[in-house]
Image (cartoon, coloured by chain):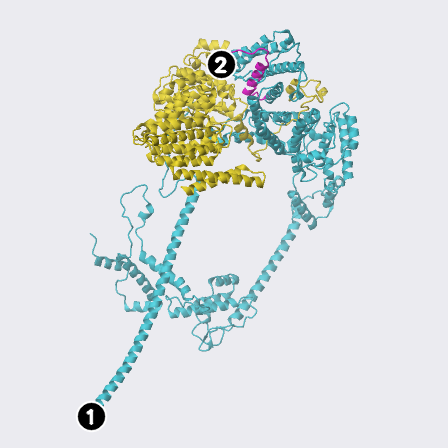
Chain colours: A yellow, B cyan
Amino acid sequence: MPTAVDSSSSKKRKNTKNAGAPSSKRRAVAEEDGFAETLSKVQELENQIAESRKHYNNIATLISMLNVEPSAKKPELAVAVSLCRVFSRLMAAGNLSESSRDAENEKIVVAWLKERCSEYQRALLSIIREADSTSQVTALTLSMRLVKEYVTHIQGADSSIWSGLFKDIIEALVEAQDGEDVRAEFVTKFMKEYEDIRYQTFAQIAEYASTRRKTDTIEILISLLSTCDEAPSPDHEIDFENFFAKPDPNNKRLRTVHGHKRRAQDAWLAILRNNLSQAQRKALLRIMVHTIEPWFTRPELLMDFLTDSYNEGGATSLLALSGLFYLIQQKNLDYPQFYAKLYSLLDADLLHSKHRSRFFRLLNNFLASTHLPATLVASFIKRLSRLALNAPPSAIVVIVPFMYNLFKSHPTCTFTMHREIRDQKSAAEIESEGFEDPFDPNETDPTRTNAIESSIWEIETLQSHYHPNVAAIARIISEQFTKQAYSLEDFLDHTYQGMVQGELGTGEKPLRKVPVVEYQIPKRIFTDRLLEEDDGVDSGAGSFMRGLWDFSS
Amino acid sequence: MPPSQLKQLKASLRESGVVGPQQSKKQKRQNAKSGVGAQNRNQRNAALQAIRDRFNPFEIRPTATTSKFEATTRDVKSTKATGRRPGVTKSLGEERRRATLLQEMNSRNKVGGLVDRRFGENDPTMTPEERAAERFARESQKKMRKESMFNLEEDEEEFQLTHMGQSLTLDGTTVDDFDGGDLDGAESDEETSRKRKRFGEDDEDAEDFIDFGEDGEDKPERKKSKAEVMKEVIAKSKFHKAERQKAKEDDDDLREELDQELPDLFEALRGMKAPAKPEPPKQDLDTMNPERAAMLREPEGKDTEKEYDQRLKQLTFDTRSKPTDRTKTEEEKVEEEAKRLKKLEEDRLRRMRGEELSDEEEVESDKDSFFQGDEDEESEVDDAAAFGLHTTSYEPRPELAVEDEDDFIIDDDLVETRSNASLSLDGSDIEEEEISDEESEEEDELINGMTLPTANGAAVSTAVQVNQTADGQLAFTYPCPGNHAEFLEVTKDVPTQDLPTVIQRIRALHHPRLHADNKTKLGRFAEILVEHVSYMANETDEPSFAIIENILRHVHSLAKTHPINVAMAFRARLREISEDRPLNLLPGDLVILTGVSTVFPTSDHFHAVTTPAHLCLARFLGQCSLNSTSDFVTGAFATSLCLQYQAIAKRYMPEFINYTLNALCNLAPIELTAKKLSFPIRKSQQSVKLAPAKKVTPRKLQFRDVKATPSDSQAEEDLKISLVTTFVSLLDTASDLWAEKSAFIEIFTPVRTVLNHLRQSFKSKVFSAARDPLQSTLDKVDAHLARAQLARRPLFLHNHRPLAIKSAIPKFEENFNPDKHYDPDRERAEANRLKAEYKREKKGAMRELRKDASFVAREKLREKKERDAEYEKKYKRLIAEIQSEEGRAANEYEREKRGRQGKR
């Protein structure tokens, strides 16, 4: 132990020296001297405590040396480390646990020591809350060490320490100022490392989040929880060897995967019930399927949250969809009017939203069943084709192959592409008055829109889209349907940027063929040059622009 | 059951004639004499060997697999082969190796040696007599060859065969049992037959000679030697020949004489005299080609004929002259021009329609290349024609009714005549040239009544004056810049309005005809000009559009000769836009996009420049920010460009509708409160609502509005109302453009909603100026909508012929051969064939090498054994010698001992 202490203290010294950045040599020397002095003093005090009990008062001295006043931003870490060692030794020696056999004065000493110990703990917690990040990390390590010592050496302190000191630690962590570093440290060094720490953390967070908290705090909690993205599989063995502290043999929950999941579920539920901001809600929905749901032993508990989110509309609905689908698929959730709701999601903003491809993946799942009524599928087709009229090319590129697949699996819908009027009377009527579109865009029930009676003129119009490739894709609906299905995944993730880059390439590459140049050089582009030659009537190319814009300066 | 082995053997012996009826003694003797015996012996040996082989079952190796059933895929070759004879092949190989490899082995590490070239020495089939005869025959042949007529040293014998020191020659006096005539017969048949021909039948002597040669009998009365006879014969034949020739010539002369007299004879026969032949028409000669006349005039003779032949030959090799084009009349020119334009227009329409995507599979499977534009392959075909038209820069340009920037560059003829000298011209000369060019252009202009397209600077009324003064200051030569910085350096001191002149001069000075490098230089220059256009619009606050327009037209004319360079330059600009500021277009970018619309055909289905330009515009419209009025001005310009792009092709642009409607909604004085709109609403962060205090009057939007901020609120409101009217008129045009689209109703119903809303919110008096155009647009849209409703029909897209069900009948091959590979891929089949051959050869070579090695090893072993045996023998001999010696000595000793004992 002493060697370790020496090395750590020397390390500390170096750190402080480096951090100090002295302006002059002399001052540096003085500081060095002062520091060395403190260090030797601390060492001396510590040694005295170890030697005999009569020097226990040194503990109080050390604690006072800790310098953890709210104003002092720079706690003496060396002292803290030394104190931790002192208390560890005391605990290991059994000096901190009282037994009934002990004499009265002995009990007093123990009580006094316990008081000092809790004082020290408070100091550490306040360091975690307020000090700079290196001190925070050190304090966290020290307090976790204390937790371990408690659990190891003091009988029966198990539950009390988790709900006492550890709870305080978690709280301090969550409420710490600029605590990203210390939280990351906690997550990597403890939470991911030790399964019992994770278990206890879940428990503490659940308790902590059961009361309404500020949005920022919730944010922190979410980020803490979402780091545990891998829920243990049911046949996973909880590794006792890998526990931070010796587990309580009576605590059965700690030994089962179910127990762990249960804790996590409680924690998540507590957070979901708390007041979430819109952004947080979306973030949660985004990680719902992959991060949150695996932890839930009873996913139906998520139902309320998801349905609420789904009913909210807009992007939140889109995001809630995947979680809801999970429930419907896995947990047999009965969601009445699901398709009507889905249909209502197809609004003007959908194709411009950044969740477009996510939505289409799901939509592809929902409409994959061949048992859906053709009227419903036709409504979706018609609605999508309406939307395509105002969609960016990257969305049209998705919609058309998707429709193709729908047509392929619901051949009844192909009437929207090809309708022969056999009834003479109605044919004549159409001939004279034009075909009235029977589709009702305002109908919310997808089975009643009459879309199957309509035609998808929109896609036909898009066959003359300005982008040649989009036009080519739109043309597939008027060709023979020889292909079995298009793989939707290939069409999903296109963007303007990608398309422009596809056309222009990233660097100078020789063109595959010589581009055609307009054969006629226009007389005028911007100005009214030589207008009198054409009798003052500007009719050449670009006359439209010149008519609208004044280029004279 | 087959007969026993013994019986079979007997039968086969009889068959091959090894055993047969005994020959009589006489026969035997005869046979021995004529050498038939030896032959018979050989035959007999061969027959016996064959029989031995046949009856030795170990000599023939049966096929590995006994034949079982006939099947198509069975290898026919292996079944056909009845069995190999490994013994035979092995011994053959052994033999061959002994002949080659063993020789090599033995002669290894040895230099020189003797080669036995004696005739028939190594031929065991020859008897010694035959051998001698053969040698003698060869020898005499050699000698005969020496007697050829070019052999000068006839008599000298280099070497000759001798017998007992006496020469074996024929012409010697020695009498030999060999006869010379017999030897003569050894001459090749060819020679004798030749001789026979030469001598002919009439020559008695020769006949005799031949007889004598053939008979091989001696003629005692012969006096002359053979050589003498020959000489005589030759002399005689020569004499005869000369005589024959003479007689023939005499005959010819006589015949000619007769021929000449023939006409007279005819006359005599007819009994009357023909009139004198008319003289050749002399007067013609004067009008004729003098040469020809001379030719005609010349007396008939060899020279004339020769010359005639020569000329004829010349004429046949002369290229046929073609009729030159007639100078065309004005009408024809116009018509031609019209035709050309029509063709170009048709090409454009074809490109506009584009071709359908070749195959959807490719689209789907090959995603990377998907957005490269698969239809390239397709459009390649129809572009070819246009491509040819645009890139042939040296083709004389037909005079355009449309004035062209190229017209003013340099008169082609002028350049042509001076092109050789111009490279070494000094500056002043070039200046002179320039001036003369200018003058000639001036003249042209006057003659044609056209103004110079350059218009010498800004196209303002005072241009001429400005230019005159400017010309005095401007240098006449400019280096061709290599990049934009250089160009800026060059034009640093040039006033902006003179920029076109400078550009024109650079182009003239670096006309591709003047130097080979100029083509690339001008290409680079075109790129610089493109860059400069955007630079000008960006850098200068008030860009002069007359100048930009002029530069763009220069770019356009350069694009005809350097389409790649210009396209690359435009693409570079577009790339810059898409990478740096896709949602924040600068004025320069707008100018570039406008330039694209004039230089390149925006109606093309796919085009290397216009397609990305479309995307850039659409992306801007789809995603740009809507924060201030200047944003809307840029947007208005972009939307106008969209319609300009689609003026011909009339393709649908969703972004246009979205942007325009959004802009109108944002600018409308009252917010639109419709629940459901088919387009996504984007709200501007700052309110740009029209909120005029007093009457606003819409005006024509100006390009500089893109940059400038309105001075006061009234000006801003004016700008806003002008934006509204611009957008409304854009919608007006768009409704015309897309009136034929099948989804016109779906597209323009929201437009009508927005316009209606606008009309309602424009009730206030302050908007009175904007109300009329709005109303007229609304009416137009309504009319279009009504027409579209009337024209609407259910879609009828799939009246394809039903697809044929795929045939499942397998393709049968007539005369299928399992050994043959029926690979439809010719190249692969060929490759496979070569591979198989290679494998086979390799195997064979390896086998041979292995056998060689074993042969060598065997030979070495044999040699070693021989050596060992020899040694052993020697050793034994020595031992024996010693033993015998010792034995003798022992005997002697014994004897001695015994003797001594005996003595004792």
- Picture quarter with the C terminus of chain A: top right
Give the structural element (helix, strand or loop) at label 2. loop
Question: Looking at numbered disc 1 in the image, what kind of residue is underneath it?
Answer: Arg
Judging depth in this view, the residue of B378 and B131 nearest the camera is: B378
User: Quadrant location of residue B567?
Assistant: top right
Left or right for A214, reference B308: left
Given residues B527 and B342, the one toward you in this image is: B527
Left/right placement of residue B76 relative to residue B700 reads: left
Q: Measuring from the top left, give residue B440's x and y in whole percent.
A: 77, 31
Find residue B753 and name its label. none
A431 and B67: which one is in front?
A431
Mark 2 surroundings within 10 Å by alpha-carbon count, few (fewer than 14), some (14 through 19), many (20 or more) = many
Residue A407 can be seen in this image: no
The residue indicated by pointer 1 is B904
For marks 1 and 2, the one nearer the N-term is 2
Instruction: Write down the chain letter for disc 2.
Output: B
Whether the residues at callouts 1 and 2 have beta carbons within 8 Å, the answer is no
Where does the image place residue B768, in percent across and percent down from the top left? 64, 8
| Residue that numbered label 2 is attached to | B793
- Is residue B220 a member of the stretch shown in magenta? no
Asked if labels 1 and 2 share a chain, the reply is yes
- Residue A254's spot in the image, x, y percent? 33, 29
| Residue B153 in the image, given as x and y percentages of width and height | 56, 70
Task: Tell me the quarter of the picture where residue A224 sits.
Answer: top left
Q: Which residues are magenta?
A: B646-675
Task: Answer whether residue B720 is visible to the viewer in this image.
Answer: yes
Magenta region includes residue B670: yes
Name the one closer to the observer, A260 or A529.
A260
B176 to B285, vertically: above or below: below
Say which of marks 1 and 2 sits in front. 1
Which chain does the residue under circle 1 lie in?
A: B
